[in-house]
Image (cartoon, rainbow, N blue to C red):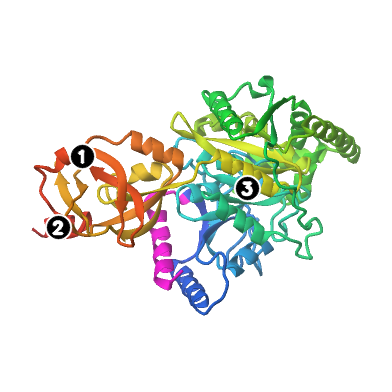
Amino acid sequence: MGASTLTGRIREAYARIADVDRPEIWISLRPEADVLAEAELIARRTEEGDHLPLAGVLVAVKDNIDVAGLETTAGSRAFGYAPSADAPSVARIRAAGAIVLGKTNLDQFATGLVGTRSPFGAVRNAWDPERISGGSSSGSAVATALGIVDVALGTDTAGSGRVPAALNGIFGIKPTVGLVPATGVVPACRTLDCVTVFARDLGLGRRVVEIMTGPDGVDPLCRSDAPAAPLDAAPRIAIPTQEHLAGLAEGWAEAFAGVVEQLRASGVEIVEVDITPLLEAASLLYGGAFVAERTAAVGDFIRSHPELHGTDLDPTVAQIVLGGDSASAADYFRDRERLDRLGLEGERRLDGTVALLTPTTTWHPTLAEVAADPIGANARMGRYTNFANLLDRSALAVPAGFVGGLPFGVMLTGAPFADRTLAEIARRIAAPDIEILVVGAHLRDQPLNAQLVAQGGSFVAEVQTAPEYRLHALPTAPPKPGLRRVPEDGVAIAGEVWRLPAAGFGSFVASLPQPMTIGQVKLADGTSVAGFLCEPVAVDAAPDISASGGWRAHLVSQRAD
């Protein structure tokens, strides 16, 4: 990636931060000038032949993971400290050319699945600001979904790297416990915590995970990879029996059934399994002695600052963390034995399957609903996620379309080290992104650009069409141009390529008003991309503005006149 391309991408990211006006995403943000300087250094290294597999990839980092030069707060200013070095997960991707923009907001001390338990503000959903983002990795998920960054790091103990992915329409990759070092991560539950990755593109997300993977010689729980065997031609995938799909949000059961049928059509054998042992294991994470590990992590700090409860310390988080004080060592060992037995029974029931497919979560509440019942609302979020780390499972949250205009997601949960297997299955579920050319009112800074963003769109590049087109000013509100291909006397027209999730593309096209259509547009470099065209009847009487070379230039000339 050349210096000009990379610096342009960074300027676009900071412009996007301003445009979306979501200050609650960030706890700290690096100065744009510092990031640009780092980008120029990376571009120079690639030009000199350095192999940087993540060159120019923009990253946000959850603020319980150390980034040198930025304070680590874990969601509490009073707790904050200045790390002397990057966490290994961060250091490894930066060494591969990734660029960190800043640190993101979270449910305080990574305790919550809602994204509202932070003195830095509740993080609003990328699609509907009245709804929760999901947590605890709230800011990282929303920064990714809004297209500000390419990927983001989160953490996952009970589902914090998966629930926000589902609610924002992106991938949430939770590796097997211990594959990525947790050194430099403020612990929630030290034996369960995973560094996770949010991404709009599964391939890029998996590449980031692979680069972060491997022992660092410091984290005693970190372990080497032991990849699972390749998939069979007709893999068997388990799904819950109907009683364990009760209570889903309206339309979600039908959406889940659609994903099941999609997998079955791809050659997968579907097996219904009673997952009661797994759900009982999930209840132990907060309903048993295991919560005492949260107390061991940050309980002393919370207990020693009673004056901050309700201000810098979230009262719900404090209640949960200090609740572990009542657990005894005997309680822990009793729960440990119960967990082991539930895990063994769960494995027996899943025997012969390569993964368990479930919805990622059960509902998508509003901010008001969570505020009215912070404990109960949060508890509903983790039905299918809470058991994974307790039982040493790999997991992957996969975007699976939309229900009622909001993202719906499913989750694949597998054996330890089945991470690549889950990604292979996920590719059968998630349709590839689609690129689209826009030339008018959907350009950045134009009045209809928000429609692209609302469907999960992210800017790719400024381009020129091949010199085979004419542009006309249509009499619409808001004003927009019509692009048409001509047999002769064509010119090159300026535009932008945007990338949309397949589901978002379908929704976007379905809402297009006449006379706009979608067709293949040839670009100046000889490639073709889907793009806005116009029905011929609509341009017959519309002024030809091709001489301007593009819609923005036409608007500038109008203002000058």
Report the amino acid beneath label 3. Ile
Picture quadrant of residue 525: bottom left
Q: Is residue 51 left or right of residue 327?
A: left
Task: Assess disc 3: are there few (<14), some (14-19) or many (≥20) residues with their C-alpha within 10 Å of its C-alpha.
Answer: many
Tell me where the magenta segment starts and ends, as one range.
1-23
Q: Which callout, 3 or 1, points at the residue further toward the start of the chain? A: 3
| Residue bearing mark 1 | 535
Image quarter where the C terminus lies is bottom left
Q: Is residue 512 left or right of residue 214?
A: left
Q: Are marks 3 and 1 in contact (CB under 8 Å)?
A: no
Residue bearing mark 3: 173
Which numbered dot is residue 489? 2
Horizontal and vertical percent for residue 115? 57, 42
Please give left or right for residue 140 compared with residue 2 in the image.
right
Query: Which corner quadrant of the image does residue 504 belong to?
Result: top left
Residue displayed at 90% across by 39% down: 333
Is residue 492 left or right of 96 when viewed as pictured?
A: left
Q: Quick check: is 221 in the magenta stretch?
A: no
Q: Secondary structure at mark 3?
A: strand
Which mark lies nearer to you, 3 or 1? 1
